[in-house]
Image (cartoon, grey):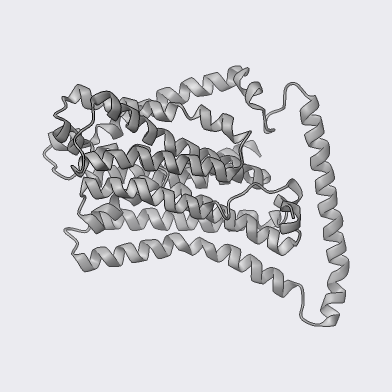
Amino acid sequence: MGTATVFSSPTVSTTGKWLGFVAAVWIQCISGNNYTFSNYSDALKSLMHLTQVQLNNLSVAKDIGKAFGLLAGLASDRFPTWAILLIGSVEGLIGYGVQWLVVSQRIQPLPYWQMCVFLCMGGNSSTWMNTAVLVTCIRNFRTNRGPVSGILKGFVGLSTAIFTTLCSALFADDPASFLVMLSLVPLVVCLTGIFFLRELPPAVAAAGSAEEVRYFGVFNVVAVVVALFLLVYGFVPSPGVLVSRVFVAVLLVILASPVGIPVYTYFKGRLGAGNDVEGQRASEPLLRSGEKENESVAAVAAVEEEAFVEKRAPEVGEEHTIMEVLKSVDFWILFVSFLCGVGTGLAVMNNMGQIGLALGYPDVSLFVSLTSIFGFFGRIISGTVSEFTIK
């Protein structure tokens, strides 16, 4: 039985598509670990007796791991989504797990070059998760790529604040506990997402596309609520154990709330089918029409795919192969711009701990959270604006 058989029912296909997107959002919520270096950098500096220059070089090694994200892009054309997620989560488990062993003093600090390798692995792990999520969801929601990209990148921006605030609420900002979260939580979430996030055939992905904009609005609202909730908690003066645990419980409920969309689509499809014979007879022409529409969508997709293969230079908005991208001047302009823009942002995030300590703040978690939260607003707005501009 193949994918087409599993998703043959329109109701099941729509529900499966949205379950996959919910899983994608959860994965993005835990894949921004590359921006959390400030939360444990001071512990590494003290235990390894590093100078500020040596600490900066460790952060550079971490960022170089993110630069190797091209490997994940190449692999995404050859391996299924579940394999990409598994590679990223296991790599993160090793990279951050070794750092936890050092910070928790379960092992002696490793040689400097070895620590650079493991930080590089930790930084690279998020690129595999981000690639798997973005590539799969953009292909599953071809008519709303801008909102999809904006929502997913927005939740990546929030992930740093989610990790930081959860660690602050549960473990009082203990760096060893924070590294445990960075190593284990992505592994668990990705292993769960493997069962739901998968690329669908074009005809199946087109099911229910008319209501996508409305559902994306719900995800945007959830994201904004999470951001504001994290922002408010960050300014609560010395929250007690009870307040912290209530915060964690409410945050998890908010993050789980998008699962209501696939549940709603499932029951809506079931109820729409009708419960009596007359309703079923009335729906038969619509079902036949829907089948014809799906066949038409599949035929159009097949023609487009054939035309895409034949063409040497795809038009704007169409998918490109890896080799076509690498030969494009536009890609390299964007790549260099990305390195310059992200590099400056990472330089600030990596040194946030040292900046806070220099200003007299022993706890810099609030600054890290605020940077993450306001970065989220920029990311989510950019997706909506870009889609509006393109259309």
Task: Tell me: 53 left or right of 124.
Answer: left
Query: Does 299 appear above or below 167?
Result: above
Residue 365 image position (x, y, % from top left)? 24, 46
Query: Does 235 appear above or below 71?
Result: below
Q: What residue appears at the point 39 percent right and 25 percent down from the top-left corner?
A: 64
Query: Does 92 appear above or below 181?
Result: above
Q: Quadrant of the C terminus?
A: top right
Q: Is residue 386 visible?
A: yes
Q: Quadrant of the N terminus?
A: bottom right
Residue 310 image position (x, y, % from top left)? 80, 25
Q: Is residue 149 visible?
A: no
Q: What residue appears at the point 71 percent right and 58 percent down from the top-left corner?
A: 6
Total marks shown come to 0
Q: What residue appears at the point 71 percent right and 52 percent down from the top-left corner?
A: 3
Residue 296 image position (x, y, % from top left)? 85, 49
Q: Residue furthest front?
A: 107
Q: What residue appears at the point 82 percent right and 42 percent down from the top-left corner?
A: 300
Query: Does 265 appear above or below 386?
Result: below
Residue 79 image position (x, y, % from top left)? 61, 37
| 103, 123: nearer the viewer | 103
Quarter holding residue 107: top left
